[in-house]
Amino acid sequence: MGRSGTHFTVRLLNGALRAVRYEALVKDPSTEFARVFSAEEAATLGALTLVETPKIESLSKYRDVLSDEQVAEIDALERHMSAPSAKGESA
């Protein structure tokens, strides 16, 4: 997306930063779309149209193409991010 397209999108979304959960997007695109955007925003953006059907096996494909060390780094990051202290919760 070009620079002007990016600025348009940020303005359209009132400058809000959105986090899309890739796993949720693959498993249930419509629900994740509804979680990320308000009903008003979704109406402005238009209906979600899938270009291709998400494949659940894509969630673990990185394990086939990355080195064991890279996979271990991702696993460690996932453990860290799911720890209570990473989520701002008290232990």
Image (cartoon, rainbow, N blue to C red):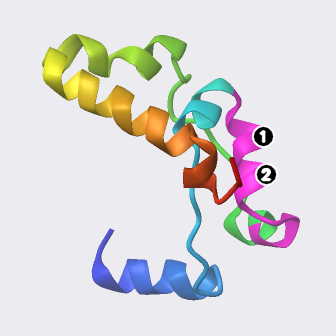
Q: Residue 48 placed where, x, y %?
A: 68, 47
Residue 47 in view, yes or no: no
Residue of label 1: 31
Q: Is residue 32 magenta?
A: yes
Name the residue at 56% across, 22% down: 53
Residue of label 2: 34
**How many C-alpha atoms fall within 10 Å of the one at disc 1: few (<14), some, or many (≥20)?**
few
Q: Which residues are magenta?
A: 28-41
Nearer to the camera, 85 or 27? 85
Tags 1 and 2 touching, CB below 8 Å: yes
**What's under tag 1, amino acid-wise?**
Thr
Q: Is residue 9 magenta?
A: no
Q: CA distance from mark 1 to mark 2?
A: 5 Å
Rendered position, 16 above or below 55: below
User: Left or right: 61 with respect to 15?
Assistant: left
Name the residue at 65% across, 60% down: 88
The answer to which image quadrant residue 36 occupies is bottom right
- Farthest-out residue, front: 91
Name the residue at 78% across, 40% down: 31
Q: Residue 1 placed where, x, y %?
A: 33, 68
Nearer to the camera, 86 or 28? 86
- Principal SS element in the magenta part? helix
Helix, strand or loop at label 2? It is helix
**What's under tag 2, amino acid-wise?**
Ala
Residue 88 in view, yes or no: yes
